[in-house]
Each structure stands twice: as structure tokens, then as C-alpha cells.
Image: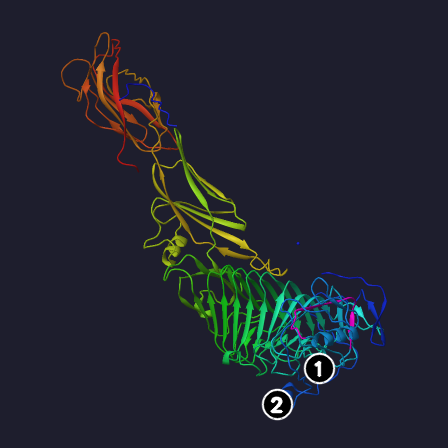
């Protein structure tokens, strides 16, 4: 209770080797290698260029060879009896060779003849190895040169090149590294096959190879082996088919950093004919395979080995490996079902070139398993298709990106299945599919935990679908903090910086919850928040901005609901082997915070004196003497006069409720405001509990003045001293 005074309470990141013209010798054959500065080729350049020389036609069909093999016709084989290892971890020196064949003291070879002799000596050793051989020079070899392997072996090229002569056949079966015994494990390390810059004496680039592969067993399907490529580069334009094994149990493994480039030319076919391909943990591999013969990037061809009785192609990208593939082949796989595993934290990028749409398989089922935090991208020049079912089994990947980069609309030419293996059944918010149409319209679809979804154009709301990304719901951290003081009642909402680029932030503030149901992450709740606008009951403010902070001022005390949605500009595939994609906008879910704006201290400026003048009997209304009554609080206050005392020295006027008819000096007095509020008449003593309502944050202050009626003598001076006792009371509960 305050008596006519102011109240003031304060709560207050190639490797190019420049070589001179050098003469090398292969047996008794002298040859010349030139480094050409004009023949370099960017592996991402897709131009199809042909040699001017006559290309050699294919005279032997693989199917005919396989048929001959099955009928008992076979190229030279080697019969021998293996003895027990002398030492599984070491072996005696082969006297005809320099070194011990160990990693620390390896055998050496600098010509094709030396390499052939070293391997022949190793093959005659009683130990299975592992034997180590290092190359001391570039190796020029002909189609008649066979480097036979019967023991476990590591060949370290020390950065030198294996150069297949341009005069050699691109269909030669028994040439190069040829494995003659099942169970052998061979590693080719730190070497180059072919070159896009080194030339022969005729000035021709060394871009020839054999389509029976750089290592393997040729057309013998009964030999299974493991071949490892570690820090290997490959370049070929004719006979470009680097990997081949017709045994279903043979495996090709990539380690370190590898780059394989194949161009369209005579007998250039698939990247691999075989069944098992592994990209080891932490490896980085780029494959630019743009050939025109045959229809698959991988062809499951040959019947050797059992493969567990289940003839299928198995591709594994192990943990934290990165694989980038550009392929002109019509199909990703051909001839057998595919089981493709992309392990935790791995990155896989596949781009279909030659203006073709991606087809996962010619006619077989495709199963793709994608692990935790893995990144997967498929880019197609047209709607993505397959000749049989395609199933994605996903377990907390970072994202799976599908995009039609061609000129036609549509994204999926057939229905595909996505099985989400993680999460809580039926619960949304963890993963979503963000998608774009041809006009860059953005849509979002929530994917519940442990559920099966169909990937099909008709499952998305946008017409002309062009790309879709299945990914974690993008998350951000934020605060919404009130600041309440005398004369200040604010709410500051702040988005904390993230590693991603924030394109836009959408804010909404409401005194009512904008959704109903069990969870704000449900599709219905998200849609309701999205649709809310300034005309929606309770909505006080809506703003779309690039600012990471949003301030609302002059808020009444009470409960508020703050809604925030962030649109990220995400470079979805920028980290995969140098591939750069157009940025894609990714919407987060709407998030909600309930915030309480507490009451500030009561702080009201009340005039100390009220003056009125009466010059004649009758009513008076003197707004010219009005004075502001100002509240600095953030809630509604009732201003009430509870008691009046007459402290006049010589009282001559009586306060009355009604002007009487009897003589005397009588004053009917009311307290009024410029917005039409009033209470009274005022009387000496206790007064009726009437109130003037003081609202917070008025644009124009409330003016307080006296009005009333006087009856009595105006010929004498009346000096009054009425003292009003008033109360300021918070009105009701928190607004």
C-alpha cells in the first residue's frame, strides 16, 4: 500500500614423375620410353578419343573359352608336388638370387627377364613364403612374358611402371602376373600399370593391356587366389579390363591409395570379371572406368569354385574406406546377384556417365547394406532402374543420396525397398528424406524407426522428382532465454554455430502450443507448426531470417512457445574423393521450447498531486490537468484508491456521493483516465474497491485526471487537502 508516492522496487588438401629419355632392356630387346607432356589426361574428363592405328578385333569369345575349359581343353598347367614349408615365417636364401626374399632384404628385378627368373626360382622353393621382390626399374613386357606365381608373394614396384608393349595383344590370356596355384596370396604394391604420359619409341602412349587382367589365372577357373593392390595406379585404353577371375572364391583387395583409369578402345570391357571385391579399411580408391564394350561395371562370369554354393557378386567397402567410381557401363553389375556392403564410416560415390541412366543389375537381385555414419551417393543420367529387386538395409548411415542429373524428370524408374534397421519402431525424428523437384522445390518426409519404406516417385509429394537424400535429421542446439527487469521484458533466441552452413532460420513465437498429439516430431505436428501464421490463434511473431538470433521485446509475463527450424546448405558429397556437388538445402524438424516470462517487480509512476479548478458551480472535466500514470511492469496492475483523509486546515468542502439539495459546499469527485476508465465518487474514509486497470507496454501512457461536480459558493476560496491512499495490485494470475 503506497500513499501518493512513486514506487521503485528493483529486481533486478597426382603424382607426376618427369623422366628424361631413357633406354631400358627387356631381355635382348632395347626399347625407348619417353615422357610426354601432352598426353596427360584428367581422370574426370569424359571425352572419348580413339587411336589412329587399326584396332585389333576380338577373335576369341570368352564364352567359347569357358566352354572349352569345361570340356577339358585348357592352357598349359603345371603339375608338381608341394612340400611342407621349411619355415612358415622365413626361408633359406635362393643361391641364384640376390637377397633373402624378406621384406628387409628382398629379391630384385629390373627387367622382364629378371622378374621372370626371380619368380621361377621362388616357385621352386619348398617354402610357401611370403616372398618379397622389389622392382628396380620400369618393366617392359610383351604378351609372351609370363610372370608365374606359385608362392605367397609381395612385389613392391617402388613407383616404377609395368608397361605392356603396344604391339602386344589386348586379348592375350597367358601374360603378365599369372597365378598357377590355388590359395596363393599376392600383393602388388607401389607400382603403375600403363601410363597416360610415357611413350614408346614410336611416340605412342603406353595405354595397352590385356583384358584378362593385370594379375590372375587367365581363363583357368579352377584356381582361387587373393590379389591385393596397394598404392597402385592403372591406365589403359585398349584391353582395359584390370581385374579378372573366373573362380567364385577369388578375391581382389584394395589397400592404401589406388587410381584406376580405363578408356574406350579395342577390347576394353568391364572393370572386373569376378565375384569378390574388397576395399580395405581406411583406403582411398578412385576408379574412372569409361569403356564401351560389355554392359557391366562388374560381371559375375565363370563357374570355378563354390562360393558357398551361392553364385553371387560380393563387394565390401570396409570401415572408413573411400571409393569413388565413374562408370559408363549400362549396369553396375551383370550376370549374378549383388550383395554390396558399405561399412561404418565408409564413403561411396558412384556416378553414371555416357549420358546413361544407372541400372543396378541386368536381371538379378541387388542388396545394399549400409552401416553407421556411412556416406553413399548414386548419380544417374535419368531415372534409376534395375532388372530385378533392389533392397537397401540401412543402419544409422550419415546419408544416402540419389540424384537424376540428366535432363529428364523422375528419380526412380522402379520401386525399391529401404529397410531401416535402427531406431525405435514407429518413432520419427531421427531420419528423414529430403527431396527436390525439377524446380528446386524442397520437400521432407519422416522415416520412422525399424520400418520398411518404398522408394518410388509416387511416395513423394513433389511432381518431377530429381533427387532425394535419406539422412539423419539435421540437428542444432539453441537457447531461448528471458531477460526481465524493471521496464524490460525480453526473450532472446539464439542458434549456436555448427560446422554446417546455415542458409536460413525460421522462428515462430506463440502464447499457445501450435500442435497437438504425442510428439512434436510427428508428421502431423510438424505440418501444423509449418502452417501456423500470424492469423493463427496465439501466434505473436513469425520471422524468416539468416540471423542466428531473434529478440522479442515487451512481452507480458506468461508462458510462451518458441519454435525454430533451421535450413542448412549442405555439401552432401564434397568429402568423397574430390567429387564436388551442388549444395542442397536440408530442413531440420521444427523444435519447440516452452519458456516462462516471470513477473517483473511492480513499478508504477503515480502523480503526487492532482489539481482541479472550479470557477462555477456544476460539472467539471479538466483533462488539461491530466498527468501520466506509467507502469514499468510486464503484467496488468489494478490501481485502487482505498481511503481518503481530509487534511484541510479549514475544511469548507464535503466530498459527497451525490450532490444534495441542501445548502452547503459539496464536491462530487471522480478519478478518471483518458481511455474512459473512472472510479468514484470519492469519499472521505473507506472507498469502494473499484480499480483503474494499468496495462503494460502501452504505446501512449495512461493520463490521470479529476472530474466531477461542485455545488456551493464560488465567491470564497476553498483550499482542500484530500490525501488518497491507493493500492497497486497484480491483476489475476500470470497472463
**Depth order, front residue of 153/267:** 153
- Judged by depth in the image, the label closer to the viewer, 1 or 2, is 1
Q: Which residues are magenta?
A: 126-141
Q: Residue at x 60, y 65 (%)?
A: 323
**Please, what secondary structure does the residue beneath circle 2 have?**
helix
Picture coordinates of residue 447 (x, y %)? 42, 62
Can residue 195 be seen by looking at this rendering? no
Position of residue 714 relative to residue 201, above or below, is above
- Indicate the quadrant where residue 173 lies: bottom right
Position of residue 138 relative to residue 716, above or below, is below
**Depth order, front residue of 305/471:** 305
**Depth order, front residue of 78/622:** 78
User: In which quadrant will I find the C terminus?
Assistant: top left
Q: Residue furthest top?
A: 650
User: In which quadrant will I find the N terminus?
Assistant: top left
**Please, what secondary structure does the residue beneath circle 1 have?**
loop
Q: Is residue 580 left or right of residue 517?
A: right
- Indicate the quadrant where residue 683 lies: top left
Residue 222's disc number: none
Q: Residue at x 71, y 82 (%)?
A: 174
- CA separation in Å, label 1 and label 2: 18 Å
User: In this figure, which residue is indicated by the disc labeled 1?
Assistant: 174
Residue 67's disc number: 2
Position of residue 731 relative to residue 663, above or below, is below
Picture coordinates of residue 719 (x, y %)? 26, 10
Display coloring:
rainbow
Amino acid at each position: 500500500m503506497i500513499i501518493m508516492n512513486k514506487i521503485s522496487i528493483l529486481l533486478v588438401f597426382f603424382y607426376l614423375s618427369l623422366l628424361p629419355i631413357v633406354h631400358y632392356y627387356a631381355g635382348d630387346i632395347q626399347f625407348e620410353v619417353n615422357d610426354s607432356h601432352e598426353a596427360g589426361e584428367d581422370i574426370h574428363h569424359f571425352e572419348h578419343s580413339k587411336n589412329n592405328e587399326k584396332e585389333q578385333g576380338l577373335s576369341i569369345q570368352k564364352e567359347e573359352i569357358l566352354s572349352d575349359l569345361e570340356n577339358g581343353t585348357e592352357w598349359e598347367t603345371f603339375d608338381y608336388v608341394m612340400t611342407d614349408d621349411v619355415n612358415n615365417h622365413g626361408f633359406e636364401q635362393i643361391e641364384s638370387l640376390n637377397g633373402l626374399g624378406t621384406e628387409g632384404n628382398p629379391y630384385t628385378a629390373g627387367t622382364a627377364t629378371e622378374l621372370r627368373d626371380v619368380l621361377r626360382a621362388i616357385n621352386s622353393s619348398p617354402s610357401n613364403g611370403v616372398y618379397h621382390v622389389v622392382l628396380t626399374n620400369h618393366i617392359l613386357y610383351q604378351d609372351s612374358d609370363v610372370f608365374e606365381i606359385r608362392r605367397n608373394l609381395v612385389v613392391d614396384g617402388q613407383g616404377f611402371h609395368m608397361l605392356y608393349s603396344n604391339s602386344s595383344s589386348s586379348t592375350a590370356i597367358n601374360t603378365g602376373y599369372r597365378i598357377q596355384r590355388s590359395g596363393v596370396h599376392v600383393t602388388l604394391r607401389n607400382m603403375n600399370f600403363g601410363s597416360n604420359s610415357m611413350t614408346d619409341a614410336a611416340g605412342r602412349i603406353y595405354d595397352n593391356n590385356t583384358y584378362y587382367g593385370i594379375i590372375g589365372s587367365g581363363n583357368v577357373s579352377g584356381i582361387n587366389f587373393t590379389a591385393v593392390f596397394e598404392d597402385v595406379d592403372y591406365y589403359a585404353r585398349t584391353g582395359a579390363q584390370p581385374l579378372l577371375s573366373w573362380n567364385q572364391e577369388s578375391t581382389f583387395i584394395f589397400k592404401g591409395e589406388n587410381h584406376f583409369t580405363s578408356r574406350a578402345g579395342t577390347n576394353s570391357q568391364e572393370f572386373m570379371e569376378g565375384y569378390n571385391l574388397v576395399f580395405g579399411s581406411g583406403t582411398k580408391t578412385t576408379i574412372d572406368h569409361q569403356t564401351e564394350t560389355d554392359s557391366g561395371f562388374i560381371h559375375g562370369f565363370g563357374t570355378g569354385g563354390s562360393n558357398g554354393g551361392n553364385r553371387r557378386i560380393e563387394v565390401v567397402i570396409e570401415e572408413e574406406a573411400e571409393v569413388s567410381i565413374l562408370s559408363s557401363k549400362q549396369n553396375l553389375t551383370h550376370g549374378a546377384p549383388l550383395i554390396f556392403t558399405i561399412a561404418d564410416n565408409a564413403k561411396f560415390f558412384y556416378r553414371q556417365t555416357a549420358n546413361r541412366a544407372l541400372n543396378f543389375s541386368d536381371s538379378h537381385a541387388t542388396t545394399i547394406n549400409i552401416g553407421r555414419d556411412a556416406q553413399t551417393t548414386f548419380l544417374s543420367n535419368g531415372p534409376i532402374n534395375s532388372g530385378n529387386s533392389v533392397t537397401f538395409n540401412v543402419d544409422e548411415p550419415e546419408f544416402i543420396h540419389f540424384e537424376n542429373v540428366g535432363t529428364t524428370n523422375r528419380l526412380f524408374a522402379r520401386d525399391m525397398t529401404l529397410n531401416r534397421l535402427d531406431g525405435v519402431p514407429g518413432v520419427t525424428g531421427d531420419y528423414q528424406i529430403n527431396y527436390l523437384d525439377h524446380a528446386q522445390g524442397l520437400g521432407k518426409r519422416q522415416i520412422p524407426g525399424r520400418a520398411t519404406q518404398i522408394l518410388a516417385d509416387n511416395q513423394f509429394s513433389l511432381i518431377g522428382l530429381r533427387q532425394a537424400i535419406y539422412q539423419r535429421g539435421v540437428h542444432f542446439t539453441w537457447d531461448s532465454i528471458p531477460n526481465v527487469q524493471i521496464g524490460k521484458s525480453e526473450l532472446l533466441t539464439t542458434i549456436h554455430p555448427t560446422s554446417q552452413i546455415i542458409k536460413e532460420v525460421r522462428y515462430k513465437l506463440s502464447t499457445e502450443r501450435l500442435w497437438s498429439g504425442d510428439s512434436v516430431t510427428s508428421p502431423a505436428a510438424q505440418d501444423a507448426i509449418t502452417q501456423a501464421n500470424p492469423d493463427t490463434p496465439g501466434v505473436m511473431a513469425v520471422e524468416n531470417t539468416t540471423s542466428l538470433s531473434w529478440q522479442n521485446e515487451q512481452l507480458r509475463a506468461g508462458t510462451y512457445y518458441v519454435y525454430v527450424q533451421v535450413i542448412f546448405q549442405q555439401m552432401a558429397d564434397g568429402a568423397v574423393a574430390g567429387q564436388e556437388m551442388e549444395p542442397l538445402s536440408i530442413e531440420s524438424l521444427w523444435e519447440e521450447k516452452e519458456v516462462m516470462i516471470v513477473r517483473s517487480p511492480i513499478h508504477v509512476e503515480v502523480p503526487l498531486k492532482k489539481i482541479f479548478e472550479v470557477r462555477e458551480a456544476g460539472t467539471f472535466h479538466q483533462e488539461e490537468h491530466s498527468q501520466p500514470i506509467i507502469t514499468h511492469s510486464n503484467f496488468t496492475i489494478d490501481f485502487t484508491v482505498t481511503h481518503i483523509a481530509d487534511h484541510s486546515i479549514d475544511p469548507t468542502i464535503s466530498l459527497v456521493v451525490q450532490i444534495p439539495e441542501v445548502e452547503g459546499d459539496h464536491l462530487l469527485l471522480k478519478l478518471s483516465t483518458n481511455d474512459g476508465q473512472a472510479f468514484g465518487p470519492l469519499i472521505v474514509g473507506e472507498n469502494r474497491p473499484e480499480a483503474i486497470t494499468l496495462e503494460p507496454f502501452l504505446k501512449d501512457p495512461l493520463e490521470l485526471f479529476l472530474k466531477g461536480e461542485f455545488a456551493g459558493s464560488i465567491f470564497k476560496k476553498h483550499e482542500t487537502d484530500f490525501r488518497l491512499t491507493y493500492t497497486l495490485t497484480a491483476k489475476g494470475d500470470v497472463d
